[in-house]
Each structure stands twice: as C-alpha cells, then as structure tokens.
Image (cartoon, grey):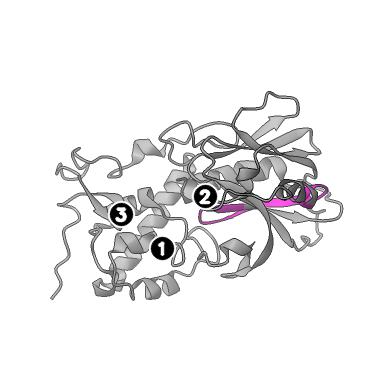
C-alpha cells in the first residue's frame, strides 16, 4: 500500500493540475469504488448522489494527512490557480472528496476525449478541459464525499478524524508523540504502524527508520530511552523526505504519480526487501522476521536485540 511519500507525490501532482478548477460533471463507472474494502454493496442511489454533490464545486486544493488524501471543495468564483484571488482569504471548505488509493488505486490526469482505461472507476470532469480519473485495477481503494471536521489541529475528512498528524505536517508535535510512544509496551515496529499515534509510516519506512536509528524491531518503547525514540522518529522523517524527493517507492506498475511516472526510491532502500542480502554497513546477512503480522527486515548486527534488566 502506498505510504506517505507515495501519497504526497500523487497529492502534489493532483494539486498542480486541479487547484482552482471547477468540477463541471462526474461519472461513476463502478459504484463499488464508493464503498470500502469491507463494504462493497452500494445503494443504487449512491452514484447519482456523488455526482450531484461534487458537480459545480470548486477545488480549493489537494490535501493529505498520512496516507489519506482529499480534495477540499468550496463554492463561489475561483480566481487563480491557488484557489482564491491574490490577497483574499481562502474560503473555508466544508466538504472534501476523500480518495484512498489502497493497494492499486491511481489518480491520473487526462485530456477530455482521451481513451479511457478499462479499470477506470470514476471520473471528475474539470473546466480546464481535463479529467481526473480514478483507476483501480483491484478495487482496493475508494472515493467519496465527506464533511470536513477538526482533527489534530486542522480540517480533515470525517472518516480520518482519528488519524494522527504525520511527520511532514506543521501539526506534528514530536515531543507529544515521543511521550505517547514511550507508553507503548508492544514491539516498536508495531507501534510505528499505529496510525492513531503517528500517521504515514508503513512497513517500508518503519524498517528503514529502525535500521537507520540502529533500533531492533522488537525493542519495547516503554523500556527504551526517549533519546532513542527521538532518533527513530527523526530517522522516519528523514527517510520519508528522501523518498519523497525521488517520487516515492515503486515496486510495480500499480503505483504511479498523476502523470503515470513511477518513483524510484526502491534503489536506495537499505534493508526493506533485502532479506538474505549483505548489510550495506557491516556485511551481515539481512534477516526477515514477522512483527505484528508484517514482514520485517533488519540487520542482526547493526540492530542488536535489546537487553532489559
């Protein structure tokens, strides 16, 4: 599943092409995309309600928290690509189009009239003679209109109100997160994947952050020095920033940016996916274990097991 850098790469592309435009119409080719992975039985009226809700709305911008992305919608005339006239306050958005990419979802920008991919599930028609298409081969993602509510210092879609701030947004409070992390008695790898504690970190970047900080995946946060926890979170921020700089991590053609290009941070991964290979630091064979049901890669020498007294 795309993690923070991949979703942010998509968000930036979507924002560049859609901020300040008007949704002149919409199509839902497959109503299942309006549901979730656990609920795909959709009321027949859902598609028409979605089209009615978004048509005529102005896209103020594409936003993200962790792995969640949404288009903030407003009303009234939009005067510039930034969504408002110079020197004028941004209209307060009340609705958003939440887009969850899942494991196979893509947002692609096309010119009107271009051939439609057979896995296209929904289309937003824009006044710029372009279309924003949601393509999802396996239908693991979903899209829908939701009210925006306050959560962790900003407006977010209602279904994401429980999602904590991520390391790349202003609302992220390192001191608070460290204090909460220090209470955890589970494996630190599992704690890093808890999106209610810190959002955006998934399996790839958790492994990479722990390796860079020299912390074993089974280390228990409540029994680990806070300075070490700070190192882990700072490493996570750094590795995700580095990944973002090159468009994220792509292992197959299912993850692409809005223009269809893949990210290539997979070339810089130090432990994730390298089980059985030599550690780039010490030459020890990279091990693969399971932590919290997730495949986990680490170096037994660089990340020694914790010793608790």
Q: Position of residue 196 (x, y in %)?
A: 46, 66
**Closer to the N terminus: mark 3 or mark 1?**
1
Q: Residue at x 43, y 44 (%)?
A: 243
Asked whether the beta carbons under mark 3 and mark 2 sit within 8 Å of each other, the answer is no
Badge 3 marks a residue whose secondary structure is loop
Q: Residue at x 34, y 76 (%)?
A: 183
Q: Position of residue 218 (x, y in %)?
A: 23, 61
Q: Is residue 191 above or below residue 255?
A: below
Q: Which residue is mark 2?
A: 37
How far apart, in angstroms, are the residues tagged by discs 3 and 2? 19 Å
Can the viewer see residue 82? Answer: no
Q: Residue at x 78, y 52 (%)?
A: 53
Q: Is residue 207 left or right of residue 82?
A: left
Q: Which residue is mark 3?
A: 293
How far apart, in angstroms, are the residues tagged by discs 3 and 1? 13 Å
Badge 2 marks a residue whose secondary structure is loop
- Say few, some or many: other residues with alpha carbon within 10 Å of mark 2 (under 14 / 14 to 19 / 20 or more): few
How far apart, in angstroms, are the residues tagged by discs 2 and 1? 19 Å
Q: Is residue 24 above or below residue 159?
A: above
Range of magenta residues: 53-69
Q: Which residue is mark 1?
A: 194
**Closer to the N terminus: mark 2 or mark 1?**
2
Q: Tell me the quadrant of the picture where the N terminus can be found.
A: top left
**Closer to the N terminus: mark 3 or mark 2?**
2
- Say few, some or many: other residues with alpha carbon within 10 Å of mark 1 (under 14 / 14 to 19 / 20 or more): some
Q: Position of residue 151 (x, y in %)?
A: 59, 69
């Amino acid at each position: 599943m795309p993690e923070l850098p991949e979703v942010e790469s998509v968000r930036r592309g979507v924002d560049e092409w859609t901020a300040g435009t008007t949704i002149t119409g919409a199509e839902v080719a497959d109503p299942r995309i309006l549901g979730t992975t656990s609920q795909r039985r959709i009321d027949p009226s859902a598609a028409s309600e979605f089209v009615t809700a978004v048509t005529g709305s102005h896209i103020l911008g594409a936003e993200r928290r962790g792995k969640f992305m949404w288009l903030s919608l407003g009303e009234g005339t939009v005067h510039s690509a930034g969504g408002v006239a110079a020197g004028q306050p941004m209209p307060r958005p009340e609705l958003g189009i939440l887009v969850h990419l899942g494991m196979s979802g893509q947002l692609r920008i096309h010119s009107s009239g271009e051939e439609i991919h057979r896995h296209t599930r929904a289309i937003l028609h824009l006044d710029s003679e372009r279309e924003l298409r949601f393509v999802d081969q396996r239908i693991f993602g979903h899209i829908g209109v939701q009210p925006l509510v306050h959560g962790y210092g900003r407006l977010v879609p209602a279904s994401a109100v429980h999602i904590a701030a991520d390391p790349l947004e202003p609302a992220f409070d390192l001191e608070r997160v460290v204090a909460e992390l220090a209470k955890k008695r589970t494996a630190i790898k599992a704690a890093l994947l808890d999106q209610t504690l810190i959002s955006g970190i998934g399996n790839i970047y958790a492994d990479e952050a722990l390796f860079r900080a020299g912390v074993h995946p089974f280390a228990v946060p409540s029994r680990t020095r806070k300075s070490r926890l700070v190192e882990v979170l700072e490493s996570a921020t750094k590795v995700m920033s580095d990944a973002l700089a090159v468009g994220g991590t792509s292992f197959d053609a299912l993850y692409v940016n809005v223009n269809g290009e893949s990210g290539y941070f997979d070339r810089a991964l130090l432990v994730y996916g390298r089980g059985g290979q030599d550690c780039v630091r010490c030459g020890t064979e990279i091990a693969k274990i399971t932590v919290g049901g997730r495949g986990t890669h680490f170096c037994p020498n660089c990340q020694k097991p914790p010793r608790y007294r």
